[in-house]
Image (spheres, rainbow, N blue to C red):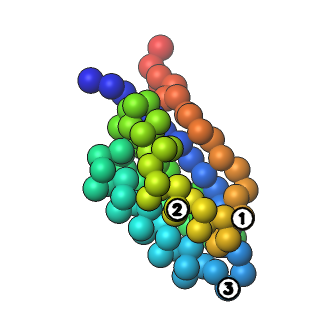
Amino acid sequence: MAQEILSVAIWEPIPEHEAAALETFHELTSIVAKKGYGRDLLYRDREHHYVFFRYWKSEDARRSAQEDPEMLRCWAKLGNEIQIVKVYETLSEVPMHM
């Protein structure tokens, strides 16, 4: 079984586009779930930054999603709704035991 791949994006909504951005993220998350690419979580801090976690099902799923027209359309919309602060494309788990 392939191991999940964690990607993280930290973003802020462009002024007066927060509701639209959240709607677009909901659409994006629905596509990811419907097509089995992975799963998403979204958090917000007190400074109004959003932290978006995507657990890709596999590298193949990520590759397919990056070429998916529905996904590309959502990311294009988000380009007008959010400002990216930082993106971590691939994070690897660090074992906590010695």
Q: Are marks 2 and 1 in contact (CB under 8 Å)?
A: no
Q: Quadrant of residue 1?
A: top left
Q: Which residue is mark 3?
A: 16
Residue 34 percent coordinates (x, y): 28, 56
Secondary structure beneath dot 2 equals helix
- First-in-chain label (1 vs 3): 3
Mark 2 → mark 1, Cα distance in angstroms: 17 Å
Residue type at tag 3: Glu
Mark 1 → mark 3, Cα distance in angstroms: 12 Å
Q: Quadrant of residue 46?
A: bottom right
Q: Quadrant of residue 49?
A: bottom right
Residue 31 percent coordinates (x, y): 36, 58
In the drawing, what numbered circle is on residue 93? none
Residue 89 percent coordinates (x, y): 59, 39
Residue type at tag 2: Arg
In the drawing, what numbered circle is on residue 83? 1
Mark 3 → mark 2, Cα distance in angstroms: 21 Å
Q: Residue at x 65, y 72 (%)?
A: 81
Up-down relation of residue 75 to residue 37 (above or below):
below
